[in-house]
Image (cartoon, rainbow, N blue to C red):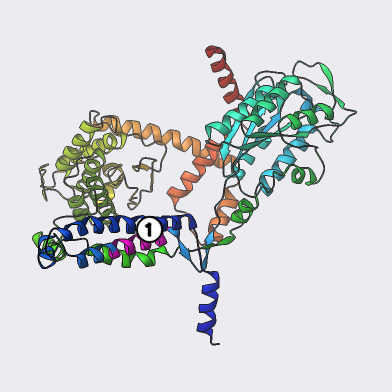
Amino acid sequence: MNERGSSLVQALGDFHFLRPWWLLALLVLPVLWWLWRLTQQRANAWRGLVDAHLLAHLQVGGGRRQRLTLVGCLLAWSLGALAMAGPTWRQAEQPLWQTRAPLVIALDLSGSINANDLPPSRLLQARAKLATLLRERAGGQVGLVAYAGQPFTVAPLTDDAANVALFLDALQPGIMPVPGNDARQAIAWSQGLLRQAGFDQGQILLLTDHADDNAEAAARSAAARGYSVSVMGLGTADGAAYRDADGQIGRARLDAASLQRLASAGAGRYTPLTSDDRDLKLLGVLDPQSEDARAAHGEKGTSWLDQGYWVLPLLMLLCLLAFRRGGVLAVLALCAVLPMAFPAGAVDWWQRADQKAQARIEQGAQAYRRGDFETAESKFRGLPTADGLYNRGNALAKQGRYDEAIAAYDAALKQQPGMEDAIANRAAVEAARKRQQQSGDGQGGQGGKGGQKPPPQGQNQQQDGKQGADKTGAQDRSEGNSKQQDPKGGEQDGKQGDPQEDPAKSEAQRQQEQQSADAAQRQRMEQAMQQGQGEQDADKAAQANGKQETPAERERRQATEAWLRRVPDDPGGLLKAKFQLEYERRQREGQ
């Protein structure tokens, strides 16, 4: 047997239906046949009253047409049932669907976490264990909760476990605003995070050294709602002494019996913390589901392909018979005439008005990036949105048509009064127009299309301002003036001391402000250069990458490093402030 024959035999052997229950629709065929026979019997009643040679002319539609109609209906019904049943005979690789099994980790940050019965301390061991969990976990969302007297969210549920790991070094008892050890609230809070994220099922992992009856009740309630509660024990049975926030000495011991009861009530598992990953494997948190693990590693699975669509052309041909005589020709003629009734491009059948406007914005942005400002302005022209008017003002300003650009900015601000980019760019264009009028270059400050020329390159720092940016993210870089985009798509001068220009200010005031800003900037630069830490390494790295820093880029880098040195090295300060604000809010609301 040749290769083609063997493939056919294999296909026949693999043939089956994905949705075989649809084949039950074939049971309707006898009912249709019975209804047709009943109609025929009623028609035969006329044979005893009317002559046979006249009966055929008196009946509406002959018996042959009725039989053809019946056969067509039965065949169409059969083909439809077969198509819906999903015939298939071959497979194809498909990306595995990741169920994103959720896990919320609740870490006990009460004073007992400082005990050293797990050397060097419980806290450091817990951090290391969580780092391993977040690094090795395959698939599934993960969140982190810290609790003492009350629970607080460190990181909400996310697919990016590395983002959660960033907070581990900041975890310590000092960031908790309320002392204590309330595992009941921690379980309830973790359950709320899972529910808010839209999960009907999930896993809660508690890291602590003991539990009480209230925690068991909370775990039992969570398990009844589909959220299992597992526990990892911190410490040893002998325990160790620790000092709490008030300076009091206490002793912490691992109460394994209470933690086992807690895990049993929460339909989960219990294990003490171990030096290797046996504890994580026992809890089942590293590989939540086999499909999740395979999907996380980029593996693919196979699935049967639905081939029912091959039946649809036959069904569509049968549907043509349902048209009245001449109906098919009318439909074909209509399909042929409609394209000729409208000129090409006059009607877009497939896009809404907002989609057409977005397409014009994208085309205008591409033209803007190429430097074709006339084309960009034509694309932005007529767009009624604030973004469209703002972009048109940018394109007009680049052509030197300052009056029209200001009018476009005014229209954008009328629709969106708080548009900061439009306010800044309008001020810059207004200042450029005034300077051009004062220069006496023969333009006389006349606006209008083609009435002005773009400012010379020597003035681009003051005249361009932010006017070269559009909302689509296009960037403009002029000679001698390095700029960067702000989050809204506008451009800002790379120097920190460059204030936004106010048209109401005089030229002398603006120059004085600029000089003051430059003096302050030079002072910061001198301080940064005196410290000089890391600058030589950055220069070597830039040279290794084949890049040569410009003076403006070097100034910006030095300014950034100087400001970064002013940030205190307190990784837990942000979490501590966040938890304190959350605690105060709960107090105000009576929670």
Let me know if residue 19 appears in the view: no
Question: For this rendering, which residue is in front, 65 or 482?
Answer: 65
Residue 564: x %, y % from top left: 55, 37
In the displayed structure, 328 sits above or below 232; it is: below
Start-end of magenta stretch: 71-84
Q: Is residue 227 magenta?
A: no
Where does the N terminus fall, quadrant-wise?
bottom right
Crowdedness of circle 1 by 10 Å Cα count: few (<14), some, many (20+)?
Answer: few
Question: For this rendering, which residue is in front, 381 or 452?
Answer: 381
To which residue does mark 1 refer? 30
Q: Residue furthest right?
A: 238
Q: Residue furthest bottom?
A: 1
**Point 28% across, 49% down: residue:** 458
Residue 368: x %, y % from top left: 27, 53
Task: Answer left or right for 340 relative to 111.
Answer: left
Q: Is residue 76 magenta?
A: yes
Dominant secondary structure (helix, strand or loop) of the stretch shown in magenta:
helix
**Point 19% across, 50% down: residue:** 377
Q: Residue furthest front?
A: 48
